[in-house]
């Protein structure tokens, strides 16, 4: 079976974008692949984060992975910082990464914003660590949202560069797996920006743990426009984003949805969307509550996951060190 690797940062509230762009797709194809899913906590410290919050977020994210339907029979699940090979390979690959390649990464520019000179160097080097995460496991496919396309491309380039220098096939060249639907869910507040955990405004996203009242409130407030026609239209990003979410949740075609809401207003559509969201998230929340209440079992399973993947990562590190002349 081909190897799949992906991960999410435990930086905040896991939202609909993370679910529709990533987790849901992992769950859907888990039987076809040999899967490794990571909670990438080393990435979570690239911007300031409270230690207690980070610690809790790691457990919450692990519980959510399982609640969303990842099955330990087909997936290995672990916390990045529990496998020190990530940090070890990171240093080595940093030394092989041209600064010019990192300068082209748009996420750094977005996240650093006006603080370019004061943010930690880790934020700048983040794509190299992400490359290590993927390359350590000789990954074939990386299922991610559209915003990560550039980082997976960089990973490929780095792997190729390293393989070329040492004239050996040390790294498998990975490929991004990005779906057409759900790959870029937009902010509810500003539909020209992607939905993000790090958005300071919680109204911008629906988290997987929002209760029905909260979902209703956020969808009701979601930015639309004054046209009042329920139709897909790239010129109207707000309603189009909501419609795309509805489309994924119902599996209906654009034509079917537009026909259903013909002559109806945004209010009717938003009520229907709210129902679908509650229907999708309620069972996830139920399972989440059961899992998070058995912390000992959760800790155990994460420890087991790290123990299972460590030898795979170590094999790659050994190959790399030998090639470079280290150790
Ligand atoms: P942060 O703001 O902390 O970067 P994030 O919401 O971007 O948080 P990540 O942990 O960076 O989340 O990404 C986890 C996964 O979710 C990645 O595969 C990413 O491509 C995907 N993803 C993130 N945001 C969206 C979105 N708005 N739509 C679809 N997929 C998304
Ligand atoms: Mg992100």
Image (cartoon, helix red, strand yellow):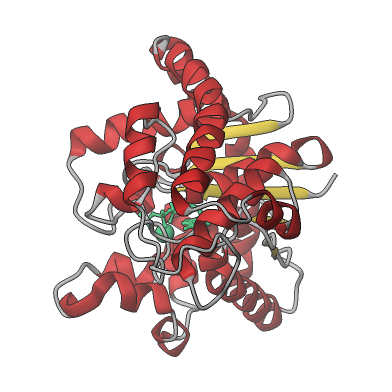
Front residue (pair 285, 97): 285
Q: Find residue 153 and report its horizontal and vertical position in percent.
A: 61, 74
Number of labels in the image equals 0
Front residue (pair 81, 231): 231
Q: Is residue 211 visible?
A: no
Q: Find residue 90 and report its horizontal and vertical position in percent.
A: 45, 62
| Residue at x 40% of width, y 28% of height | 212
Front residue (pair 254, 4): 254
| Residue at x 63% of width, y 76% of height | 162
- Position of 326 with respect to 202 (left or right) is right
Q: Is residue 12 visible?
A: yes
**Quadrant of the rendered image containing residue 88:** bottom left
**Quadrant of the rendered image containing residue 43:** bottom left
| Quadrant of ligand 2 in image | bottom left
Q: Find residue 10 and report its horizontal and vertical position in percent.
A: 37, 42
Front residue (pair 60, 201): 201
102 in relation to 5, above or below: below
309 in relation to 99, above or below: above
User: Which quadrant: the N terminus?
Assistant: top right
Q: Find residue 186 and report its horizontal and vertical position in percent.
A: 45, 61
| Residue at x 31% of width, y 50% of height | 221
């Amino acid at each position: 079976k081909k190897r799949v690797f992906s991960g999410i940062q435990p930086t905040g509230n896991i939202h609909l974008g993370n679910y529709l762009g990533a987790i849901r797709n992992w769950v859907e194809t888990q039987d076809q692949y040999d899967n490794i899913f990571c909670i990438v906590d080393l990435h979570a410290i690239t911007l300031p984060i409270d230690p207690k919050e980070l610690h809790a977020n790691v457990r919450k994210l692990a519980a959510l992975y399982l609640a969303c339907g990842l099955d330990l029979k087909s997936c290995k699940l672990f916390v990045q910082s529990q496998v020190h090979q990530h940090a070890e390979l990171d240093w080595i690959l940093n030394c092989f990464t041209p600064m010019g390649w990192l300068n082209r990464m748009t996420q750094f520019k977005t996240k650093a914003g006006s603080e370019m000179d004061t943010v930690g160097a880790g934020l700048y080097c983040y794509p190299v660590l992400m490359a290590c995460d993927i390359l350590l496991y000789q990954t074939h496919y990386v299922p991610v949202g559209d915003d990560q396309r550039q980082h997976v491309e960089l990973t490929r380039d780095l792997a190729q560069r390293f393989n070329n220098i040492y004239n050996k096939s040390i790294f498998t060249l990975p490929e991004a797996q990005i779906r057409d639907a759900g790959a870029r869910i937009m902010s509810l507040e500003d539909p020209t920006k992607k939905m993000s955990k790090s958005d300071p405004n919680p109204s911008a996203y629906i988290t997987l743990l929002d209760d029905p009242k909260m979902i209703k409130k956020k969808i009701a407030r979601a930015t639309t426009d004054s046209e009042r026609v329920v139709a897909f239209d790239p010129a109207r990003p707000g309603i189009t984003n909501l419609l795309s979410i509805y489309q994924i949740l119902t599996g209906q075609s654009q034509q079917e949805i537009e026909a259903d809401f013909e002559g109806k207003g945004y209010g009717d559509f938003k009520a229907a969307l709210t129902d679908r969201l509650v229907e999708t998230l309620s069972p996830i929340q139920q399972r989440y509550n059961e899992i998070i209440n058995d912390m000992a079992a959760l800790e155990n399973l994460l420890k087991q996951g790290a123990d299972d993947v460590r030898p795979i990562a170590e094999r790659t590190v050994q190959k790399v060190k030998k090639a470079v002349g280290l150790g």
